[in-house]
Image (cartoon, rainbow, N blue to C red):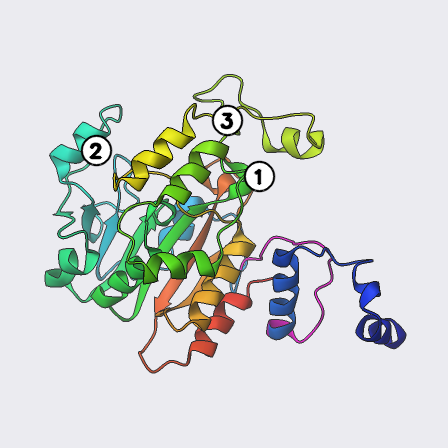
């Protein structure tokens, strides 16, 4: 073993014999070594693990709300017609970007859309929920990937949570969705949106979404949809149809300042953790990772194409390195 380690250290050419040279894999392996003090056992990029608590027959809903202090006061962002939290059981406020009438008009194909308690004011969650603060928890299922400026969004949520309060989020796993062909987000992408004070999805995000979003795992809406494994194991011989017909026109519309709803950010469980660790390193993260649940492909609910992170608001004096390390621990 010692001779192999020595070869790795002294012969750079040996590295390419067993380590994928893509930047994502190199970043992962470095992060794994920092977190665990040992070299990652795989050459490629594995999925993240459930941490710190293992997963044992936990549903998608229970992953999102099972660790929340539901006896306290909280908010659910974007509940639409399937809220995770019931008003009869919890002291929860429903929050969305439009009021009830606006949401029902926008999503007319959905039945049972709930009454919105707090429509967004001044495009700011901080302004919208300031009068209700401090909250004990916030839940946002399949929301963050649509947010043009997630760093600001996270900071606004932190501003209305008590220290120790929890933010529970779920995000789609690129590998199981129409985002299969898209490159994954990194910290620099989010930092740029933050520094540019983005308020709408930019032309790049709109073009990337519409030029590559494909009929993968969309059999409920597109009969000729394909499964991810067909694309992966087809090695190029099997292709999924790109859904949008005119991505350049949509990108130009976005360039004019129009708000076009897209997946601005694309993740796998591992890339999400690396991105959040990068945000922590930049000093713009007020949440540590309290619990992480990777995608469960065998599940028969939304868990089969989503992963869940429970984030805890930390005190302002918490060193950024401690926050960063919390996102490295689930790797591997």
Element type at mark 1: loop
Q: Is residue 246 left or right of residue 238?
A: left
Q: Which mark is residue 113?
A: 2
Q: Quadrant of the N terminus?
A: bottom right
Dot 3: within a 10 Å radius of its alpha carbon, few (fewer than 14), some, or many (20 or more) residues? some
x then y, percent, for residue 232: 66, 35
Of tags 2 and 1, which is closer to the observer?
Answer: 2
Residue in the foreground of this view, choosing between 36 and 112: 36
Q: Residue furthest top?
A: 223
Dot 1: within a 10 Å radius of its alpha carbon, few (fewer than 14), some, or many (20 or more) residues? few
Q: Is residue 161 left or right of residue 130?
A: right
Dot 2: within a 10 Å radius of its alpha carbon, few (fewer than 14), some, or many (20 or more) residues? some
Q: Residue at x 66, y 62 (%)?
A: 26
x then y, percent, for residue 169: 37, 53
Magenta residues span 35-50
Give the CA distance from mark 2 to mark 1.
29 Å
Residue beneath disc 1: 298
Q: Residue furthest left?
A: 131
- Could you tell which of marks 2 and 1 lies nearer the N-terminus? 2
**In contact (CB < 8 Å): disc 2 and disc 1:** no
Q: Which mark is residue 242?
A: 3
Q: Quadrant of the C terminus?
A: bottom right
Q: Is residue 279 above or below residue 91?
A: below
Q: Residue at x 32, y 49 (%)?
A: 147
**Residue 263 can be seen, yes or no:** no
Q: Is residue 165 above or below residue 218?
A: below
Element type at mark 2: loop
Give the CA distance from mark 1 to mark 3.
26 Å
């Amino acid at each position: 073993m010692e001779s192999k380690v020595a070869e790795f250290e002294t012969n750079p050419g040996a590295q390419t014999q067993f380590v994928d040279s893509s930047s994502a894999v190199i970043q992962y392996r470095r992060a794994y070594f920092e977190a665990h003090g040992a070299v990652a056992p795989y050459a490629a990029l594995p999925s993240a693990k459930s941490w710190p608590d293992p997963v044992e027959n936990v549903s998608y809903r229970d992953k999102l709300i099972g660790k929340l202090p539901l006896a306290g006061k909280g908010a659910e962002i974007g509940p639409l017609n399937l809220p995770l939290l019931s008003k009869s059981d919890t002291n929860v406020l429903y929050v969305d970007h439009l009021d009830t009438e606006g949401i029902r008009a926008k999503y007319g194909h959905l039945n049972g859309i709930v009454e919105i308690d707090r429509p967004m004011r001044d495009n700011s969650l901080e302004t919208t929920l300031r009068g209700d603060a401090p909250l004990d928890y916030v839940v946002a299922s399949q929301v963050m990937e649509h947010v043009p400026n997630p760093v600001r969004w996270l900071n606004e949520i932190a501003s209305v949570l008590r220290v120790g309060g929890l933010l529970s989020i779920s995000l789609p796993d690129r590998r199981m969705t129409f985002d299969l062909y898209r490159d994954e987000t990194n910290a620099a992408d989010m930092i740029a949106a933050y520094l540019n004070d983005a308020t709408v999805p930019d032309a790049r995000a709109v073009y990337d979404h519409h030029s590559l979003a494909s009929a993968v795992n969309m059999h409920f809406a597109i009969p000729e949809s394909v499964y991810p494994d067909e694309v992966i194991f087809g090695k190029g011989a099997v292709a999924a149809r790109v859904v949008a017909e005119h991505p350049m026109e949509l990108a130009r519309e976005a360039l004019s300042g129009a708000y076009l709803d897209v997946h601005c950010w694309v993740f796998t469980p591992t890339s999400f953790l690396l991105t959040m660790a990068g945000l922590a390193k930049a000093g713009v993260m007020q949440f540590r990772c309290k619990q992480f649940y990777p995608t469960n492909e065998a599940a028969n609910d939304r868990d089969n194409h989503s992963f869940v992170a429970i984030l805890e608001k930390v005190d302002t004096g918490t060193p950024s390195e401690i926050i960063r390390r919390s996102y490295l621990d689930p790797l591997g």
